[in-house]
Image: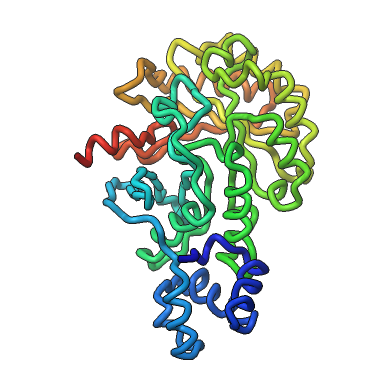
Amino acid sequence: MEIISSYNLKELRGKFESLGLEAYRANQVLNWVYKRFKTDFRLMTDLSKSHRDMLAKNFKVHTLRLLGRSEASDSVKYLFQTEDGHIVETVLIFERDHLTLCLSSQVGCAVGCRFCATAKDGLVRNLHTYEIVDQYLQVQKELSQKIRNVVFMGMGEPLANYENVRKAIEIMVSSWGIDLSKRRVSLSTSGLIAQLRRMAEDELLREINLAVSINAPSQYLREFLMPLSKTNSLHELLNVLVEFPYPEDRRIMLEYVLIEGVNDSPIHAKELSNLIKPYRRKFKVNLIPYNPDPSLPFQRPPMERVYAFQEVLRKANISTFIRLSKGVEVFGACGQLRSKRLQHMLK
């Protein structure tokens, strides 16, 4: 059976024509799915009954099965199961005046960051486009308020699943799709240089928000925390980001997870300041106090240490923010998503 959200509009129009349907019927179906969030073909009343029956026989929208949810005051973590039995997490975050959805792009992750719980599982597989989009659809259909912001910061490295993530973003920002603003879609990467260069040449992806996990001011320390830095060096990464074709009124977000006794000292702050200062108009820095996980040996630094780190950057006129992650209560915060732990909890 075909899955509607595996197609973009052009592809679906061609598919419908091959089945004997008028191409414009694809526009009608996508309007129901992405604008009204109706996924039962029987409810698509601007189609004839014969068309609805044919669609129900050949197509479906959802492939993920909702296993459960964990609710906190600031977030809801959704637990989904793929058709081949893998676990995927999606986190809805309550902001002051809008909703943000944190999407996963892979089951597990191959990047291997030492401080991230997801990395302990390794990479199981990439998520398909329709599995990424389905996370949005299943959460949105429960809500009366439209999800305004989407961030690819869940399980996995989005740029390691480039084609599926790109197509999911195309569906999310296109007028025939979910129709989110490109400025409301963010992609967070550990810094895969070849894929960042590809993204810089991609007319779609270079217009969304880009966040890059840097986490250390030196090559040596970054290699320890993020082994991928051995082949994606900090120096080369910075050069790629400086040259990234971003509009002058926007800045790339450099994400820095502060881990007690590892990368949070005033010396580290000064090193980071020296690294960024020549390009401070290109970047802003997001300081993220580490979200502890019982399976890992790292701890969150005291807030006075976080503020001291921020002050060093501010004195260098570097735009700097502190992000206190939401979802900690339900293990849905940055670096805490882990499929094997969840599989164990379900037994």
Q: Is residue 101 visible?
A: yes
Q: Quadrant of the N terminus?
A: bottom left
Q: Is residue 133 above or below residue 308?
A: below
In front of the other: 96 or 220: 220
Q: Quadrant of the C terminus?
A: top left
Residue at figure coordinates x 47%, y 72% from the top left: 58
Residue at figure coordinates x 44%, y 22% from the top left: 115
- The x, y position of residue 24, in whole percent, is 63, 81
In front of the other: 310 or 18: 18
Q: Is residue 344 above or below residue 36?
A: above
In front of the other: 167 or 263: 167
- The x, y position of residue 25, in whole percent, is 59, 81
Say whether residue 344 is left or right of residue 284: left
- The x, y position of residue 205, in whole percent, is 69, 48
Q: Is residue 24 above or below residue 108?
A: below
Residue at figure coordinates x 51%, y 69% from the top left: 34
Q: Is residue 90 above or below residue 160?
A: below
Say whether residue 199 is left or right of residue 297: right
- The x, y position of residue 50, in whole percent, is 46, 88
